[in-house]
Image (tube, grey):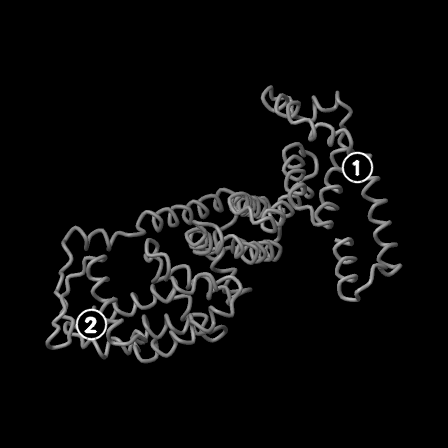
């Protein structure tokens, strides 16, 4: 990084002579780097010999018990952590990710540093844009946070902070990984993370809303999303959440049409969402069309084009393609310039399935709640729903 700063200085000031303070800082960095390389040399020798490293891994000898015979001690392992952090500061993210993965594999005596190494590896993977590795690290970090919360390693405030950081760091993964938009729904619709959003970062609703609207396979969580948006409307609103509220709560198609243009402007200025613009606009138009069709049997194409923020010809082509691809029970009357919707009554089977959605999850939650009450009685105190001390 110091070399990069030197290059920038030379380019800006059109000179070959960098300032003395930068060169002094560079010498200090090289001195520290040389010292860390010396103390980590037993590890670095193994890393450089790929055949030796593969042999140790195949024979299950890549553990501290065997590595001690090669001159690697617990102290050397801790120096590897310091060396990894120094490499991160120098901008060598590939080496950071590799060394921290090894550190976490071998570390069994310092859980705090092991946890910090997990954060460091995630940061390095994000900066390298290694999205598969970053997604894996994100899930590992989530599991570790929940494990530490259950074991009381974190107090409630620390757990809230850790989940908040995970959500924000996860935005890089959610909107760059191929399955990231499903991952954000899977993680953030868990009760603990919804509570985190509502308590600490309601602005995350923007990203969750975009992910739900774009991801057609996960529209089953739309009711929960609308509920949370309504609850948080007094603390956070933006054009994207207002679009959903106008459409699903107020059925205000004029308001939704106005918000759709504002949504485009908002997404264009958002670092994480700018790549989703076309996909969002298409999904938003489809959503408007679907809801409008639910409450109207006969739809004027000119009026619908206005609500979709499109010209008439484009709207008619879009509707024709939608009817073909989505197999809608609809047809276009060109003479009357109308879309005629067919009436579809859900079968008994579909009604039963819709009514029993989430029944297993709700039953499991009820069982866990009752079990906590039984454990509380056995432990000598009454559960809070019987007037006892409330569980944390």
Nearer to us in this view, 386 or 223: 223
Q: Which residue is mark 2?
A: 295
Ranked by sequence position, the earlier of labels 1 and 2 is 1
On screen, 66 above or below 338? Answer: above
Q: Quadrant of the C terminus?
A: bottom right
x 14%, y 69%: residue: 332
Q: Is residue 302 positioned above or below 324 on the image?
A: below
Above or below, 255 against 383 in this view is below
Q: Position of residue 291 (x, y in %)?
A: 25, 69
Residue under circle 1?
A: 37
Give the Cα distance between marks 1 and 2.
Answer: 70 Å
- Residue 335 is left or right of residue 19, and the answer is left
Which residue is drawn at the image coordinates 67% and 38% (left, top)? Answer: 99
> Is residue 132 found left or right of 367 in the rendered image?
right
Mark 1 is surrounded, within 10 Å at the Cα level, by few (under 14), some (14 to 19) or many (20 or more) other residues, namely some
Label 1 SS: helix
Q: x, y (%) of residue 188?
A: 46, 56
Percent position (x, y) of residue 225? 39, 63
In this orientation, which residue lies closer to the viewer: 371 or 342? 342
Q: Residues within 10 Å of mark 2 (few under 14, many from 20)?
A: few
Residue 160, quarter of picture:
bottom right
Front-most of residues 296 and 286: 286
Left or right of residue 36, residue 348 in this image: left
* Image coords of residue 204 (percent x, y): 50, 64
Callout 1–callout 2 Cβ contact below 8 Å: no
Q: Across the whole image, how many numbered discs are drawn on residues?
A: 2
**Which mark lies nearer to you, 1 or 2?**
1
Quadrant position of residue 121: top right
Secondary structure under badge 2? Answer: helix
The residue positioned 79% from the left and 66% from the top of the image is 13
**Residue 372, which numbered label?**
none
């Amino acid at each position: 990084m110091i070399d990069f700063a030197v290059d920038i200085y030379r380019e800006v000031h059109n000179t070959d002579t960098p300032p003395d303070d930068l060169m002094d800082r560079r010498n200090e960095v090289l001195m520290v780097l040389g010292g860390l390389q010396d103390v980590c040399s037993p590890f670095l020798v193994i890393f450089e010999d790929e055949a030796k490293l593969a042999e140790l891994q195949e024979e299950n000898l890549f553990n501290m018990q065997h590595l001690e015979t090669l001159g690697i001690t617990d102290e050397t392992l801790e120096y590897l952590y310091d060396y990894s952090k120094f490499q991160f500061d120098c901008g060598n993210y590939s080496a950071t990710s590799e060394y921290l993965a090894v550190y976490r594999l071998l570390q069994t005596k310092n859980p705090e540093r092991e946890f910090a190494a997990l954060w460091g590896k995630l940061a390095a993977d994000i900066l390298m844009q290694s999205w598969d590795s970053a997604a894996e690290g994100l899930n590992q970090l989530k599991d570790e946070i929940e494990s530490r919360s259950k074991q009381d390693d974190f107090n409630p405030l620390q757990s809230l902070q850790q989940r908040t950081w995970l959500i924000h760091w996860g935005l890089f993964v959610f909107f760059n990984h191929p399955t990231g938009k499903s991952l954000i729904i899977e993680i953030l619709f868990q009760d603990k993370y919804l509570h985190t959003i509502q308590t600490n970062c309601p602005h995350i609703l923007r990203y969750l809303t975009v992910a739900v609207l774009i991801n057609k396979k996960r529209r089953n969580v739309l009711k929960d999303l609308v509920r949370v948006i309504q609850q948080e409307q007094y603390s956070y609103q933006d054009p994207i959440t207002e679009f959903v509220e106008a459409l699903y709560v107020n059925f205000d198609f004029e308001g939704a049409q106005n918000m759709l243009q504002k949504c485009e402007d908002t997404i264009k200025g958002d670092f994480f969402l700018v790549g989703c613009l076309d996909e969002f606009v298409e999904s938003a138009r489809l959503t408007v069309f679907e809801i409008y069709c639910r409450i109207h049997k006969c739809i004027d194409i000119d009026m619908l084009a206005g609500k979709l923020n499109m010209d008439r010809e484009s709207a008619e082509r879009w509707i024709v393609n939608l009817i073909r691809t989505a197999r809608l029970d609809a047809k276009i009357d060109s003479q009357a310039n109308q879309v005629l919707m067919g009436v579809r009554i859900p079968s008994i089977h579909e009604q039963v399935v819709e009514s029993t959605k989430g029944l297993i999850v709700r039953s499991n939650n009820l069982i866990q709640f009752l079990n906590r009450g039984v454990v509380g009685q056995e432990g000598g105190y009454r559960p809070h729903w019987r007037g006892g001390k409330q569980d944390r």
